[in-house]
Image: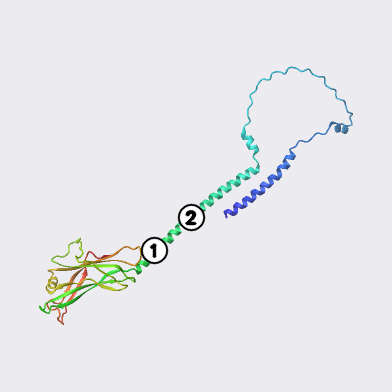
Amino acid sequence: MQVRHFFTALLFAFGIGQFALAEEPAQADAQQPVQQAPAVQEQAATGEKPVAKAEAAPVQATAPAKAEATPVTAPSPVPSFIHDIKLTDVLLAIFAGMLVLLGRDLARRTRDAATVARDSAAVAEKSARVAEDALIAGQRAFMFIREIKTYLHQDPDTGGFHWTIHPIWANSGNTPTRGLAINTTYRLLDAPLPKDFEFPASQDAPVPTIAGPRSMVEAVSGSISADDLAAVKEGRKFFYIWGWAEYHDIFEGTKKRVTRFCNQLIEIDGNPASPVDAHAPLQMMFGFHAENNYAD
C-alpha cells in the first residue's frame, strides 16, 4: 500500500515539474520591456509638423566635486537564495525526502522480517529437539529391577536348608543397552540401615552383560541360611540387597544411564526350619528401602 502511494506521489511530482518547466519560458517573454514607438509615428498621428530640436550649447567641463565616501553594504544571501529557489527544486527536495522515508520503512521491514525468520528458526530447532527427545525417551533402553526370585536348597550331608536369591533386571525399552554393567551387594545386619547410608558397591567386579529390547538379565545371586532367615522373621536381623546398573543407550550423544536400587526382606511366611511343608510353604517378600532407589 505504501509503495503504491509512493509511486502515485512520484508521478504527481513529475507532472508538476513538467508544468513548471513549460511555464518558465512564457514568464520570461512576458517580462521583456516593450519598445516605444518612434516620435515620428506619434507626430503623424497628431498631424503636427516635425520641429527641429535645438542643439544645446556645449557646457564647459567643470571639475567634479568630490563625492563623500559612503559605506557599501553587502547584500544578504538569504533573500537571494530564496529568490533563486524554483518549483522544481522544491519538488526534488520533496522527492528526496520521500526516498529517505521509504528507505527507513524498508529497513524497518527488513529488520522485522529478519526477526521473524530468526524466531521461526528457533521454534523449528526447539520442535526438532523436542521430537528427538521424545523419540529417545520412547525408544531408549531403560533398566530396572523387575523381581527377586528365591530358590530353596538342601544340603545332602547335613540336611540343612538355605536359599539362593536372584535379582532380575529388565530392559523395558525398544532398543538394546550398550556397555551394561551390574553390581549387587547382599548384607545381613544387626540393625536397620541408618539414614543417609552411602550404599557402598560390592568388592566383586561388576558383571558386564547386555540386555536386548524388552528382555531380562539376572544379576549375581546371593544366599541366606534357614537360621538367618528365622532371625530376620523374628526381627533380630535385617537383610538388604542393593546395587546398580550402568549402561549407555544406542543413541549418539546421550549420557551414561544409571539405575540404583535397595530392597529389604520385609516379610517371611512359613517356617524356615520346615520350608517344604505342603500345608505352609515358605515365602519371602522384598520391598523397596526408603533410600537409594532412582534411575536417570
For the residue pair 80 and 62, the one nearer the viewer reads as: 62
Looking at the image, residue 4 lies above or below residue 76? below
Q: Residue at x 63, y 37 (%)?
A: 82
For the residue pair 251 and 57, the one nearer the viewer reads as: 251
Amino acid residing under circle 2:
Ala
Quadrant where the N terminus is found in the figure: bottom right
Q: Is residue 134 left or right of residue 168?
A: right
Q: Distance between the residues labelled 2 and 1?
A: 24 Å
Q: Is residue 242 left or right of residue 228?
A: right
Amino acid residing under circle 1:
Val
**Residue 250, image quadrant:** bottom left
Whole-percent x, y for residue 157 in the image: 10, 79
Q: Which residue is drawn at 59% across and 46% down?
A: 96
Task: Identify the disc placed on residue 232.
Answer: none
Q: Name the residue under label 1.
A: 130
Q: Residue at x 67, y 49 (%)?
A: 15
**Residue 236, image quadrant:** bottom left
Q: Name the residue under label 2.
A: 114
Whole-percent x, y for residue 291 in the image: 22, 64
Looking at the image, residue 227 lies above or below residue 296? below
* Secondary element at image label 1: helix
Q: Do the residues labelled 2 and 1 touch (CB within 8 Å)?
A: no
Q: Which residue is drawn at 60% across and 45% down?
A: 94
The numbered mark, 2 or 1, whose residue comes first in the sequence reads: 2
For the residue pair 276 and 243, the one nearer the viewer reads as: 243
Q: Which colour scheme is used?
A: rainbow
Mark 2, other Cα within 10 Å: few <14 / some 14–19 / many ≥20: few
Mark 1, other Cα within 10 Å: few <14 / some 14–19 / many ≥20: few
